[in-house]
Amino acid sequence: MATPRKQTRSAAARPAAKTKPTKPTKAAVAPKPPAAKPAAAPKSAAVAKPPAPKPVTVTFEPEWLDGIRQMLLQRRDQINNVVRASRDQLAANDGESSDLADRASDGFEDELTAGLLSIEAAQLEEVETAIERLENGVYGLCTTCGKPIPKKRLEILPFAKRCMKCEDEKARNIPHADDDEADDEEDDADTD
């Protein structure tokens, strides 16, 4: 009898030898440069102002403007008289009394007079500004938003420089996009 022969498989039919699984290789990646810090924005550029509004003109009758001018000039003269009298009173009270109680009373009166003098000086400046605005042809325009101030408001308060809306916002300390630096300086002076 013939001996059975071992069957041999061809190399192709044999199972492949087990190999270790290999990790996929990573592509070389260049290191990232350090992130640049964003430049700090200047504080003045933090709030961009909108473009200036188109110029508005207000047309009042010349007779009406003459009446307003006369009212402003009369008010300026009245304030100048009050300021002059207050300064004279302050100068007259300077070291006049030797009694301690009288000097204390005079000191109180002087402080009161100085406070009133300050108020009158501020109003004088407003009147002078209104007269300048009349002469420059911009009287009756709100200095904050540029819109016309109603005629009735100007008749009641001839040195008004803001419309009622802007005046209310200023009174509530609501910042307005069109506020100019002069108003900011004025606000700073009010807090001193």
Image (spheres, rainbow, N blue to C red):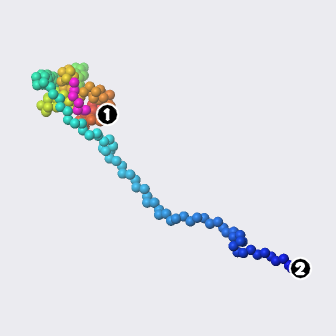
* Viewer-nearest residue: 152 or 127: 152
Q: Residue visible at 76% across and 75% down? A: 8
Q: Residue visible at 45% across and 60% down? A: 32
Residue 177 falls in which quadrant of the image? top left
Q: Which residue is mark 2?
A: 1
- Tell me the chief SS of the magenta region: loop
* Viewer-nearest residue: 156 or 94: 156
* Viewer-nearest residue: 18 or 55: 18
Q: Position of residue 159 (x, y in %)?
A: 19, 26
Q: Earlier in the sequence, mark 2 or mark 1?
A: 2
Q: Magenta region: which residues? A: 144-150
On residue 81, the disc is none
Is 77 in the magenta?
no
Identify which amino acid the numbered label 2 is placed on. Answer: Met
Q: Residue visible at 31% across and 44% down? A: 45
- State whether residue 99 appears in this view: no
Tell me the distance, in whole angstroms, between the alpha carbons under discs 2 and 1: 116 Å
Does residue 13 appear left or right of residue 73 in this picture?
right
Q: Position of residue 75 (x, y in %)?
A: 14, 22
Q: Which residue is mark 1?
A: 175
Which element carries disc 1, helix, strand or loop?
Answer: loop
Quadrant assignment for the C terminus: top left
Quadrant assignment for the N terminus: bottom right
